Image: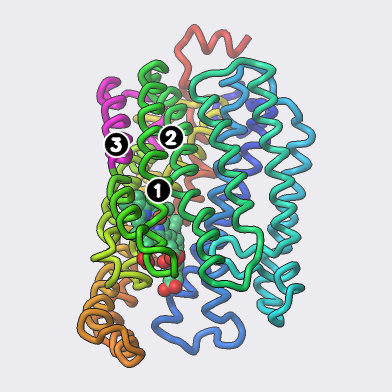
Amino acid sequence: MKLGVLDSSNLTGGQQLAVKYYTVAVVLFGAQILFGLFAGLQFLAPEFGYNVLDFSVNRMVHVNAMIVWMLYGFIGAIYWLVEEEAGTELVGLKLGNLAFWVLTAAVTVVVLVYLFVQTGPGEIESIWFINEGREYIEAPRWADIGIVVCLLVFFYNVAATFMKGKWSGISGVLVFDLVAVAGLYLAGMFYTTNVSVEQYWWWWVIHLWVEATWEVLIGCIMAWGLIKTLGASRKIVTTWLYIEVALMLGAGILGLGHHYFWIGTPEYWFTVGGFFSALEPVPLVAMVVHAVYDSGVHRFKNTNHPALAWLIAHAFGNFFGAGVFGFMHTLPQVNLYTHGTQWSSSHGHFAFFGAYATINIAMFYIALQKWRGNVYMSAGLADNGWKWKWALGLLNMGVVGMTMALLVSGYEQAFVERALGGSTWAAYFAAQNSVWFIQGMLWREIFGLMTAAGFGLLVWDLVTIGRTETRSMLIPAEAAKAAA
Ligand code: HEM
Ligand code: HEM
Ligand SMILES: [Fe+2]
């Protein structure tokens, strides 16, 4: 292993596949930010892109790019860890590579159709070939089916690898969770003309993904990440994982009810949704305690500072973005006023970034370290590591800034449109034109630019970090073994 050189022979087969997924993930993350900036600009200059790239299109590309890049990141993370965790080589590597290319080609076609075809007549063909019209999972049906097939390949690879090698607490939870992630996607694939029924099932994917199965998934990745970056004890980490999963599923599944307040479902959802979703922050507190405890026990000593910093950003981002900002509007008494305002968008940005962007970025850094021949990536990095530190700062401050700006706009909507105006059409426009609302939109765009700057720096750092590094992360005995 030559230190500092980006060499794929430093990686196992599964890990080489993982970095392919990561590469696409970073590209799509960039697309997400670009189209977010377009959509944000349209709040300030509504004529921008009119009839060429309408708000609806920008918004769709923005949120779909996000879902897809995060899924790519997760798949990459699992391919990254599966061989080491199972103690054997990846089963079905060739098939996995094929699935990667098929999936990536499909994603490319879908994005091009979103951008150039955009909409079709209200017929079933549009659902099959243009888009299915379900926010976040708009992929047309042909692509839906392709996605399911590629994910089945992925599932087979992962499960078969653990079956061939050995199981652990983490891998058991992981495989069980992957069944649920894939299974729930099916709930968003059929079509009904009844909007209430349509929404009812759509939330099975959206809510149960991000507040149950994705949380469990990143619980597994986090557990593994803490073992790898800090050398945390597997026994302790696994115990935490079980507790977190039990709490997460306990509150998250019935917490689904907080989306059933106003869509025409029975009234008992007020009580069920209000009560259980209010408990959802509890496991998120456990996750912060867990991460900080582990780091403290190891005195934050590790060989990959950027990765650990992003893991900690994840623990806090998940707690504040999902837990605190979710809790704020989860009781029906509050949600009556805040539902569907920029308040929701404020929480949506903070939660997705805080919980999921962060941990993916941590895994990118873990991958780069090994890709560059296990270089040391802690104190004393070239240029004092200013790039990763500034990227961390700008991205987090950018997103928190957007969150606060959106909260101001959302607060104003809840007050002017809902509380004072009683949710009339006229009140809606009064709220949209109020100076507080517009200022919030302006500041969102400014902080969005800060986020974009942070992203640019992150990419720059990812391609350069460790390049001139001459120290190995391995302790001498291990280094000798690795060199042999
Ligand atoms: C990482 C986890 C989470 C993510 C990524 C997330 C993301 C989102 C997003 C994007 C929306 C907007 C959905 C739409 O388009 O209508 C939303 C809505 C909502 N979230 Fe979360 N969320 C998370 C966790 C939570 C938690 C833990 C709670 C409560 C404790 C919560 C409470 C809510 C509520 C009540 C709404 C509905 C807002 C409305 O009525 O408009 N969320 N969430
Ligand atoms: C970098 C600058 C960004 C800008 C300017 C931006 C702008 C926007 C805009 C204008 C919307 C549509 C909101 C609406 O319909 O009223 C939106 C939605 C959304 N964005 Fe962003 N965004 C940015 C970055 C991000 C990032 C980094 C994430 C998460 C990782 C994210 C996650 C979301 C989500 C989840 C929604 C849907 C929210 C909802 O349904 O309430 N965005 N964004
Ligand atoms: Fe939810």
Please tell me which residue is depicted at 39% across the width and 69% down the height of the picture: 262
Q: Which residues are magenta?
A: 282-308
**Distance from Cα at disc 2 to Cα at disc 1:** 20 Å
Q: Upstream in the sequence, badge 3 or badge 1?
A: 1
Res 350 visible: no
Where in the figure is residue 272, as x and y percent of width and height? 34, 52
Mark closer to the observer (2, 1): 1
Dots 2 and 1: beta carbons under 8 Å?
A: no
**Which x, y percent locates residue 206?**
50, 56
> Is disc 1 placed on a helix, strand or loop?
helix
Judged left or right of residue 88, residue 94 is: right
Seen from this angle, which residue lies furthest bottom? Answer: 426
Distance from disc 2 to disc 3, alpha carbons, whole Å, reads 11 Å
Q: Position of residue 406 (x, y in %)?
A: 31, 69
Few, some or many C-alpha atoms within 10 Å of disc 1 (few <14, some 14-19, many ≥20)?
some
Magenta residues: mostly which secondary structure?
helix
Q: Position of residue 359 (x, y in %)?
A: 44, 41
Residue 219's disc number: 2
Q: Is residue 284 magenta?
A: yes
Q: Amino acid at mark 2?
A: Gly
Could you tell me which residue is drawn at 51 percent across and 29 percent down?
A: 173
Sequence-wise, the earlier of marks 2 and 1 is 2
> Which label was assigned to residue 376?
none
> For mark 1, what is the residue?
254
Q: Is residue 407 above or below residue 116?
A: above
Point out the quarter of the image occupied by ligand 2: bottom left
Mark 2 vs mark 3: which is more N-terminal? 2
Amino acid carrying label 1: it is Leu
**Residue flagged by tag 3: what amino acid is it?**
Val
Instruction: Look at the image and tell me whether residue 230 can be seen.
Output: yes
Query: Image height check: is 345 above or below 11?
Result: below
